[in-house]
Image (cartoon, rainbow, N blue to C red):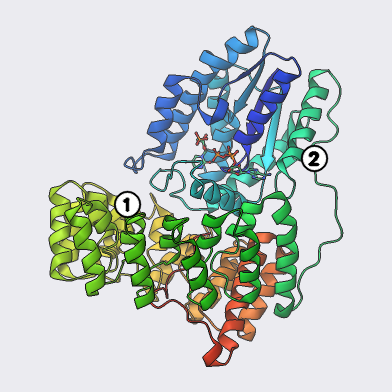
Amino acid sequence: MFIDFEGIDGSGKTTLSNLLAERLRRLGYRVAHAREGGELRSPIARRIRELTRDSKLLEMSPRTEFFLNLARDAQQLEEVIAPALARGEVCISDRYLYSQLALSGGGRGMPETALEPACELASQGLWPDLVILVDVEPELARLRKRLGKSKGERAPDSDSRKGLAGAGLAVRMRESFLALAQQDPSRWLIIENNDLPLHVLEQRLVEAVVARLEGRELPAQRMTPPSATPVQVPTTVDEVEEHFFRILDGLEVREPQLAVWLLGGIPGFAAHQRRLGFLERFPGLTVRSLIGLDDEPARALRELLAEVVPQDVAMSLGTNPSPQAMSLRERLYAHAPADVLSSLKRNDSPEAWALREHALREGRLGEVLCGLAGVDDGPAWAARELGVRSGLYADAARSLTGLGSARADALRETLLAHDRLAVLRSVQGLDTPFAWQLRAALEDKALKLVLRSLTGLSTDEAFALRERGAPLTKEALDSLDGLDDPRAWRLREAFVSRWPATGVSSLEGLPMTEQAEALVLRALELTAARLPVLRNAYRLVAASHMAALPSERTPQRMAGDGAQRPVL
Ligand SMILES: Nc1ncnc2c1ncn2[C@@H]1O[C@H](COP(=O)(O)OP(=O)(O)OP(=O)(O)O)[C@@H](O)[C@H]1O
Ligand SMILES: Cc1cn([C@H]2C[C@H](O)[C@@H](COP(=O)(O)O)O2)c(=O)[nH]c1=O
């Protein structure tokens, strides 16, 4: 029997397919997993995969990508899947040709009728007996993936071609997978991976697959969580806090690390109380959740954990340039040099330069460059030039972020030949001819980064680009953070139903006016107050509570962190 796992990135395919293989083996079945632990078994397929992920290959067309992906699946089929089936084994695959239909069809917009014959050819008529669609809300999948990366489970792949089109691609792929499942209900089994602990999903999955292996019928196509009490949605922003912590209580039992992660950047007493509850089990994640916060409890927690998790403490400082943050960095440097140096962006104080000079004497040029964004003095330029001579192109490009001078653009021109995406990232917030030319050249190749580079811009050109991008991906709304322009409001209101969590987070930095409240409540209602939206809503509510406190009690927001919200 051939069992294929499908679903968007981060949906849980690798986790669940590995668990199933293990359980079936323990039950005595002979099982071959074509991608055990996430690694494709065929070396040729692995080489093709590298090609499809290479972020230098921005010109790869959707058709080329489709044929390469087919080649990868055809090779896995011939080298691994077909022989395992011929030996009479149960063969499990983590993605197969359906992924290519969903990516190239739903995701990239190629006509499915044209794709199907090519898939048929690649499959040689061999299609899975059972397809398990691990269905998850894309925002939740993104959160879990980010958390996994922060725990070091996965290598960071910010510079893979994957994801360059923006988070909207996963939303379209999910819709495609669900449509494929609907067209062929006897072959597809849908497992929702939103609210159930892994061990429960695993058990249900094993029972369903064993039923199929024993020739019994599958219970139902959709394995839905048992309906709990009717969903309650906040009807005023004052109810958001209670709802958020109630949902967080449930999550704390199932996925405690995700619960800590969701506290990222939330100010106020209630969130600090929760952090204390997590401190012992997850000190690193807990201190990281202080990003953007500079109140007394945040400072005390950092002091407490400086020796225990120095890297996380350094990260949690963001780019705060306060004297207290600088003196903590001096203590942390010996244990977390890269994170300390990276947190010196826009900081040209003598203390920051003392740290950089120390690092340069230790040969840490690349790490120094990573924290030079926005610094425009002589020593910064000397470091950049040395970086280029040493081949540190991406780091040199990073160091240019926020600089709009002719000198910065001249260096960008040089760096373009080496790393276009790094240069694109460096034009964030710039309204220069160079920045606009680059955006135009890369709009169809790296829409996510192009849209992100608009953060803080309110020109007509920036809004025109956002309007083109908003139907495709949420990053068009991300770049509205803090903008109170009528055009920003029109975009939020038009697209909050498509990108509800981002519609809410784009209100960051704005007062909680009636218009903002209405948008937040609409997003909550549209999504039945699902976690990613509820979490973003609570972050706004908590910030507005802080802003309403009498000024002597108002915890300071981190200076220098105006444009920084935790990447969740
Ligand atoms: N129900 C769950 N509870 C807790 N963590 C989960 C759950 N489902 C998935 N995860 C976590 O989410 C992350 C993504 O899961 P996984 O790697 O299995 O997804 P995937 O679909 O294989 O992703 P990709 O296609 O990107 O490789 C992992 O860190 C995994 O541990
Ligand atoms: C570019 C891109 C691809 N996918 C899908 C389609 C492919 O079959 C697989 C390859 O990825 P994997 O890491 O080897 O599983 O992923 C996608 O989901 N999103 C993308 O941006």
* Circle 1 SS class: helix
Q: Quadrant of residue 479?
A: bottom left
Of residues 526 and 398, the one drawn nearer to the viewer in this rendering: 398
Vertical comparison of 91 with 171: above or below: above
Q: Is residue 136 placed above or below 565 in the rendered structure?
A: above
Circle 2 is placed at which residue position?
223
Q: Residues within 10 Å of mark 1 (few under 14, many from 20)?
A: many
Q: Is residue 397 left or right of residue 318?
A: left
Query: How far apart are the two marked residues, 1 and 2, measured between alpha carbons?
Result: 41 Å
Q: Note whether residue 470 is visible.
A: no
**What is the x, y in percent for residue 487?**
49, 77
Q: Is mark 2 within 8 Å of ligand 1?
A: no
Residue 344 visible within the image: yes
Q: Residue 207 at x, y = what percent?
A: 81, 29
- Left or right? Give the position of 159 relative to 247: left
Determine the residue positioned at 49% across, 41% down: 154
Q: Residues within 10 Å of mark 2 (few under 14, many from 20)?
A: some
Q: What amino acid does circle 1 point to? A: Leu
- Residue at (48, 30) in percent of width and height: 69
The residue that mark 1 highlights is 421
Q: Residue at x 13, y 57 (%)?
A: 385
Q: Earlier in the sequence, mark 1 or mark 2?
A: 2
